[in-house]
Image (cartoon, rainbow, N blue to C red):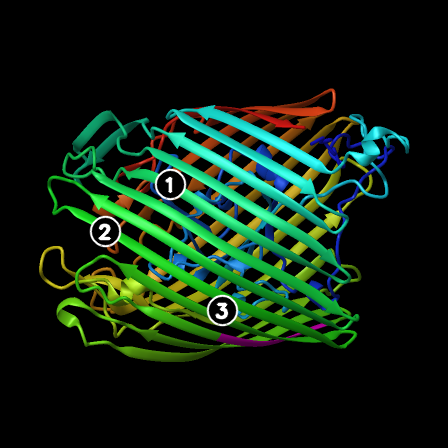
Amino acid sequence: MTCWLALTGTAQNKLDSVQHVREIVVVSKPAMREVVPSQKLNGELLERLNTHTVADALRYFSGIQLKDYGGVGGIKTVNIRSMGTHHLGISYDGVALGNAQNGQIDLGQFSLDNVEEITLYNGQKSAIFQPASDFGNAGSVYIRTKEPVFSRDNGPLDPKGRLLPKGTQEWTMDNCHLRFRVQYGSSDMLRLSGLWEQKISETVSSSVSAGFLTASGKYKFHYERRYPDGTTAWDTTAVRQNGDIHAERIEANLYGRLWQGSWQVKGYLYNSARGIPGAIVNNVWKRGERQQDLNTFFQAAYDKSIGNKFATRWLAKYAYYNTHYVNRDSTQLPVDNRYKQQEVYFSTANVLELLPNWSASLSYDFKWNKLDADIWNFAYPTRISNLVSLATAIDYKHLKAQGSVLATFINDWTNRRGEFAGQDSHSSLSKLTPALFVNVYPFQGTFFSLRAYVKQSFRMPTFNDLYYTDMGNANLVPERATQYDVGFALNKHFTRGIVRHAEMHFDAYYNTVHDKIVAYPKGQQFRWTMLNLGKVHIKGIDVEAEADFQIGKDWVATTRVQYTYQDARDVTDPSDSYYNDQIPYIPWHSGSAILGLKYKGWDLNYSFIYAGERYDEQENIIYNHMEPWYTSDLSLRYQFMLQRTKFIAQAEVNNLLDQDYEVIVNYPMPGRNYALSLTVEI
């Protein structure tokens, strides 16, 4: 098989050379009606940053809090605007990722090697052409993988970005792209990845992305604890243990183009075996917990426009997750459990343009979830969810508006065995959740806009919340959330001068969460139950700004900064000692900055992340206080051509100033660490 590397648009940034623009398939005009701008990180920026997983990238979005348990293989989850992980929807190429067992998606398992763009929406994606379940999230993250692009009418380009003459051999050889990447770094970390893109016909193409990761997870850390009176309780340096990981990932895609439409089929498999280092407490430095995961799913998408006024989208998915958890700590009872989770998902979304400035959509989702486990007295739950959404959007002169209502119908069944055999149960729930978004452009053009929205949403209790042995509570009701947001956006492009693009977003918001699900002790040691006890009021501000600079002919500088203020108070019961205290792990102040400098084939990038003071328990007392932390990361990359092969070499230093910090209490994070990588595209 013969391959030729298409350096489409990235070989040179000169405007006097032939530019190859990625083909855009417009499905329908209604599909483009967005109201509230989103936060985005594209593939080029993701490659320059010291980010390797989706969780790493999300740290640079405002309003996001990342829970990172440390190390290469540590579990990484996120929550949005202090409402919790369960209120954030994650979609992979347009299809939602789910976990009915505990509601948390470990974003560390999704590599950035094949990601084109990550987008964050607060409230919901403001395009009405979407699955019904997308209308139910308090916020959404959309991960879009790279779709193969092959040279077409303009023909292939040479290494300098110039069009090759017709009749040359390369005109018939642009049917295959290959990319290989190897990275080695601290903690004995080795990453290998590959991407193969193949043009099958003029309308069908494929891609296969695979990756391998191994690491010992060992790193030095400084551990210090003080008593409330300021005297030192612990002060030592140790090596993190039991944090090793071995993981393989493979993803295969098949893409097709139709007249006024497209289709995609995806298969994904992730297999990992990792140690769980656990918290450092009671002078215990090593844990015996291990976990194996085999996660796989298959999904398909079909988009089709019928004329200029109607478009339809069909989605289908089957997912199977197998988790094996083992705990061999000598201080605890041995545990060896397997959990098998299945999901079947089907969705159809339809949008109709009623008038040139007015469109409406109707969507329906069906979801079936089942959880099995080899635990005595397990409930073996099954859940069937039906969701129907009706939405409308108006785009008229200086006004864009979108309204939606989502109807959710959920039925749960249990099939108990053991001593509870025959005590099966069935429960049902129905909810209506509306939302309204408005965006106003008061001036001619679109450089300045004012926006506001109000939205209601809820999250169902997970299977663990309801049915976990000795802990679940089948009488739980869903958490309810209401969001209010007002903000503005500035966006301006310049054709001359040093500043070429400037953009700013500002949002002030107020959220309330009622019937918050919390774990509550029942009085016996190691015995807990889940109760609807919580009420949380959240006030916050998100600010994001970015700018691009053209300095002379060859220098390009980029800047991106974001700041978040959050005041998230527990207002459950005035008699509680922690009433009106900040909820755990939510800092009042946090932010990040990205600075990039590009000169010809060189890229220098600096990133900074800050999280202010916070508390690790409900009571805001000095014993639970956590100090602010910040990290600085630096990377230098160089790309060059050799024959028709593209090479990218990158060196990175993470936690440049060797800060001692913890995202989660008693889970120390790595100090200064390094990585070297080489990418080859042929």
Relative horizontal placement of residue 257, taking residue 564 as reference (left or right): right
Q: What kind of element bears circle 2?
A: strand
Image quadrant containing the N terminus: top right
- The residue beneath circle 1 is 272
> Mark 2: few, some, or many residues within 10 Å (few <14, many ≥20)?
some
Read off the magenta span: 387-394
Lower sequence index among marks 2 and 1: 1
- The residue beneath circle 2 is 337
- How far apart are the two marked residues, 2 and 1, measured between alpha carbons? 16 Å
Lower sequence index among marks 2 and 3: 3
Amino acid residing under circle 1: Ser
Relative horizontal placement of residue 301, taking residue 574 as reference (left or right): right
What predominant SS class does the magenta segment belong to? Answer: strand
Q: Is residue 180 magenta?
A: no
- How far apart are the two marked residues, 3 and 1, measured between alpha carbons? 31 Å
* Res 678 → quadrant: top right
> Mark 3: few, some, or many residues within 10 Å (few <14, many ≥20)?
many
Relative horizontal placement of residue 238, taking residue 567 as reference (left or right): left
Relative to the observer, which residue lies in front, 309 or 615?
309
Q: Nearer the viewer, mark 2 or mark 3?
A: 2
- The residue beneath circle 3 is 136
Q: What kind of element bears circle 1?
A: strand
Residue that lies at the very extreme toward the front in this rendered image: 1
Q: Is residue 526 above or below residue 613?
A: below
Q: Locate residue 663, reporting x and y percent.
A: 35, 42
Which residue is depicted at the point 41% across and 53% down? 105
